Amino acid sequence: MRKKLLVLSTTAMLGLGSIVAVPAVKAESISDLQNQQQVIQGQRSGVQSEINSALTKIKTLQIEQAKITEQILRIEQAIKDNNAKIDETKVQINETNAEINKLKEDIVALQVRIEQRNEVLKERAVSYQESGGNASYIEVLLGATSFGNFIDRVGAVATMVEADQDILKQHEADKKELEEKRTAVETKLADLTSMKLELEGMLAQIEEQKSQSLQLSASLKGKEQETASLVADLKERDANLAAQVVKIQSDITAELNRQAEIAAANKRAEEAAEKAAREATKYVPKESTKKNYSSESTATKTTATKTTSNNSATKNPSKDTVKDDEPKESVSIPPSRNLSAAITAGNKYIGNSVYVFGGGRSQSDINNGRFDCSAFVYWAYAQGGINLGSVGNTDTLLNHGTRVPASDMQPGDMVFFDTYKKNGHVGIYVGGGKFIGSQSSTGVAIANMSSGYWANHFNGRVHRF
């Protein structure tokens, strides 16, 4: 029986020792898995941050695309309106050419009458010269042979005097009329021709602006597609990392279950050892044997010590919040004599307006940012409380404000440029060598008048209010 008990105790001790020795290695494996899980979670956090950034970029591109689309629609409407204005101007030019042809006929008739009068006057001059230059209306009267003849001669002289005066008056009137008609025709034709040239040049600029807008729109769409493709790739990468996290978590769970089973087996072995020890106490061995049994039991209990497992917590990193604040280019405009409202009023139209010849003269045009240069200036000054009356053109603006030297130019001053005609363009000086106005190529915009096109066309005319 003692031999049986000894075998039982030895078996329990060896089994317990072999079971307890394994978990230490596996616990280190769990730690490695948890470290891998944290690394992958960090990678996922980075990928998700990139996804958020890409989604924000897509949203920004879509907003820009919407603005470009609106601008293209405005430009297309402006092109349509300006084409109509060009057609109207062509009709006016044709009508003016018809007037010119009629005036040319009138001029020919006037020239004929003038030539005829010139002949009459020449004949009279010749007659006067042939008579020795001494003939006079008095001599005609004194040559009368009778009273009746005298009366006849008086009537004839009166008729001659009146005829001479009428000829001279008609002659002067015809010459004056001829010059006036020539001047009127030439002026009207020059104005219409200049207007046509301006409209055609402006239309070319607007077409170029439309072309650039379409190119930008295509570029934005391309960037949006590229970014959307990037988002798809990042989401796929994130899904793969998520699958790896799930796999590692599954491995950790399996390992923990295995360790739980080992712990349960350890407990069972310990209980078996204790039971064997209790069975041994039922017998009364010799003193020497008792000591051996006591020594063996103590060794068995000491060997059957349980090991502890490692516990770790998995961190869940939060997603990064991505902000995409794109700075807007702005112009710092110094205040000047309460004109800041007039200077800054047009800022809201920068980038979302269009130049229309004759535009800005109705509330609908103003609401939709459709201005020509003079109408914009009228409107902008009105926002600053400066009423210039009904909207006219650049020529009527010459009658407003006080002219000052260009060297004394200050923000809020009205500035003029020679384009298709003298003083053909107008804007408002904002400081720093720049002005704001409605330009045919950009709509309402801030342009540089210190160099380039506008510097070459600035004529030095400056008006102050």
Image (tube, helix red, strand yellow):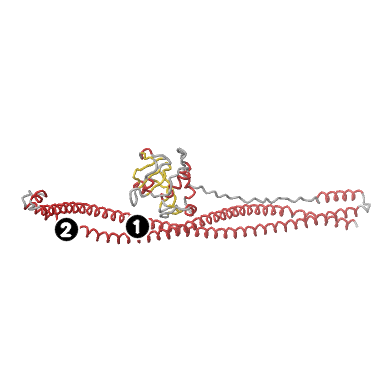
| Gap between marks 2 and 1 measured at Cα | 41 Å
Label ID, residue 196: 1
Q: Is residue 372 left or right of residue 293?
A: left
Q: Amino acid at mark 2?
A: Gln
**Mark 1 Cα shell of 10 Å, populated few (<14), some (14-19), many (≥20):** many
**Mark 2 Cα shell of 10 Å, populated few (<14), some (14-19), many (≥20):** few
Q: State the count of labels.
A: 2
Residue 37 percent location from the top left of the image: 66, 54
Q: Nearest the camera: 218 or 228?
A: 218
Task: Write down the residue under mark 2.
Answer: 116
Q: Amino acid at mark 1?
A: Lys
Question: Looking at the rendering, which quadrant does residue 5 occupy?
Answer: bottom right
**First of labels 2, 1 by sequence position:** 2
Residue 112 vertical position relative to residue 434 in the rendered view, above or below:
below
Residue 105 percent location from the top left of the image: 24, 61
Q: Nearest the camera: 376 or 173?
A: 173
Which residue is drawn at the image coordinates 45% and 37% (left, top)?
A: 337
Q: Are marks 2 and 1 in contact (CB under 8 Å)?
A: no
The quadrant of the image that shows the C terminus is: top left
Secondary structure under tag 2 reads: helix
Q: Nearest the camera: 235 or 336?
A: 336
Q: Is residue 27 left or right of residue 321?
A: right
